[in-house]
Image (cartoon, helix red, strand yellow):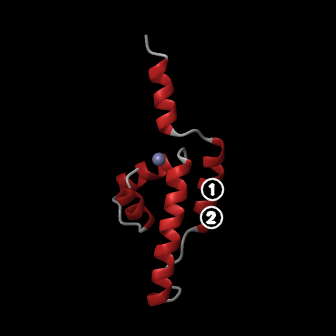
Amino acid sequence: MSTEAVAAFADGELSDSAAHRARAHIVVCDECWREVNIQRAAAERLRQGSQGDSVRAPESLLQRLNEVAAQAQCAADVRRRSNWRRG
Ligand SMILES: [Zn+2]
């Protein structure tokens, strides 16, 4: 994912379908997963500074995604592998 997409996803600014795709990528991509967490923590700090506790990160969802990511491969890696097998 691009840094912008990661930031938008962390901020909840993606459309439903885009956010769905982002989520599907994050559960298989450790790098983007980490990036989203960093962006989210930064955004959270900003929000807490201005709005108090009105916005909270869905920690249970993050935890579940993290568990799945721990046992999943990167989608790009899978794609690369299937290309190698071609021919
Ligand atoms: Zn990725």
Answer yes or no: is residue 32 visible: yes
Tell me the kind of residue under disc 2. Ser
Q: Residues within 10 Å of mark 2 (few under 14, many from 20)?
A: few
Name which quarter of the figure residue 72 lies in. Answer: top right
Q: Does residue 82 lie above or below 39 as drawn?
A: above
Q: Nearer the viewer, residue 52 or 80?
A: 80
| Residue at x 63%, y 56% (from the top left corner) | 64
Q: Does residue 14 lie above or below 41 as drawn?
A: above
Spatial CA distance of label 1 from label 2 is 6 Å
Residue at which label 2 appears: 60
Q: Nearer the viewer, residue 51 or 7?
A: 7
Ligand 1 lies under 8 Å from the Cβ of mark 2: no
| Residue at x 49%, y 74% (from the top left corner) | 42
Q: Which mark is residue 36?
A: none
4 on left or right of 24: left
How far across and how far down the image is residue 27, in percent?
55, 48
Q: Which mark is residue 64?
A: 1
Q: Residues within 10 Å of mark 1 (few under 14, many from 20)?
A: few
Question: Would you say the residues marked 1 and 2 are in contact, meaning their CB atoms lie under 8 Å apart?
Answer: yes
Tell me the kind of residue under disc 1. Arg
How far across and how far down the image is residue 65, in percent?
59, 54
How many badges with numbers are in the image?
2
| Residue at x 44%, y 22% (from the top left corner) | 83
16 on left or right of 76: left
Query: Secondary structure beneath disc 2?
Result: helix
Answer yes or no: is residue 54 visible: no
Name which quarter of the figure residue 28 lies in. Answer: top right
